Image (spheres, rainbow, N blue to C red):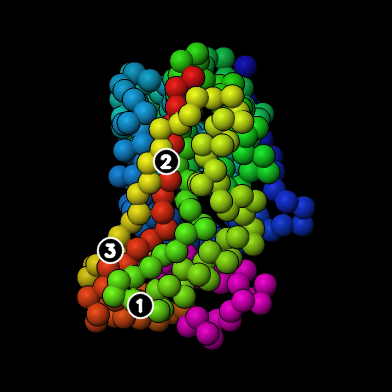
Amino acid sequence: MRSPPLSIAWPRKANMPDVDYILGHSPAEIRRLKLQAGILKPITERLLREAGVAPGMRVLDLGCGAGDVALLAADMVGPNGAVVGIDRNGDALSAACSRARGAGHANVEFREGAAEDFVDPAPFDLAIGRYVLIHQADPTNFIRSAVSHVRPHGLIAFHEIAIYGECRALPPVPLWEQCWNWVATAFRSVMVHPDAAGRMTAYFHDAGLKRPTIFCETPVGAGPDSPLYGWLACTLRSVLPQLEKIGVSTAAEVDIDTLEDRLRDAASTVHSQVLGPMQVCGWTRL
């Protein structure tokens, strides 16, 4: 029996606002997601390739959102493979379905619900999640739930953002570092496990899995055409209400409408290389 449409929230701390709420669904947030997808695609693609994704496989995308990872996996498994994406956000799934149709992917489907309530009659070759462990009340149990959907000797993979690291610029660009500090502060105020990227090996161990193969990549940009300026500015725009709510910054201080240009000018003037947040990826075979 396949999972029916559900409206089940991911577990989170009591009285803690939902990260989807602070990000919202504005045009700026849509642009942020597009920029982010382009920046993260080669990193997630490396994770899938190193884990051994191949044509004909069945892949489960946990917390699929607007479908970026699911669509990437669909390209890699080909027409003889299949991808199922699950997420609790119906609006995101509607966007994912529309994108899949637009891309001509007949091998992808999306279902509304949570991983612990998901049911499918056939096991998957691989379960993957991107930016999902950071939101779980119990990442270890979430991984165990993912394992329950994977065949024996199948694969488990996760791609997580390191909220705990610094995003520096060299030569230094104080505005760049200040803005990332604001973003990190906003996310830490709503994320259940902002350090999940650094604890992946422990989570896998506690879930009874083999030690994962781990790698880390950091997005880097330089010059006026880098997408990182827009990514940071759009992210800060989306979390600005949360920053104001917790008393960290104000709209006047951030001056969001000019921020992207100011970041670009500040970095380009000193010929700086700007670093985004570390991306930690891990996978293992059951």
In this image, 171 relative to 101: left or right? Answer: left
CB-based contact (under 8 Å), mark 1 and mark 2: no
The residue that appears at 35% across and 81% down in the rendered structure is 262
Q: Quadrant of residue 154?
A: top left
Q: Position of residue 222 (x, y in %)?
A: 24, 67
Which amino acid type corresponds to the residue marked 3 in the rendered image? Answer: Gly
In this image, 278 relative to 113: left or right? Answer: left
Q: Position of residue 145 (x, y in %)?
A: 62, 27
In this rendered view, identify the residue nearer to me: 13 or 258.
13
Answer whether residue 184 is visible to the viewer in this image: yes
Secondary structure at badge 3 equals strand
Figure quadrant of the N terminus: top right
Q: Quadrant of residue 169?
A: bottom left
Q: Is residue 87 above or below residue 167?
A: above
For the record, the magenta segment spans 232-255
- For label 3, the residue is 221
In this image, 28 relative to 10: left or right? Answer: left
- For label 1, the residue is 173
In this image, 195 relative to 73: left or right? Answer: right
The residue that appears at 47% across and 51% down in the rendered structure is 161
Crowd class of label 1 (few under 14; some 14 to 19; many from 20; radius 10 Å):
many
Between discs 3 and 1, the one toward the N terminus: 1
CB-based contact (under 8 Å), mark 2 and mark 3: no
Between discs 1 and 2, the one toward the N terminus: 1
Secondary structure at badge 2 equals strand
Mark 3 to mark 1 CA distance (whole Å): 13 Å
Q: Position of residue 88 (x, y in %)?
A: 61, 41
Crowd class of label 3 (few under 14; some 14 to 19; many from 20; radius 10 Å):
some
- For label 2, the residue is 281
Q: Position of residue 201 (x, y in %)?
A: 51, 36
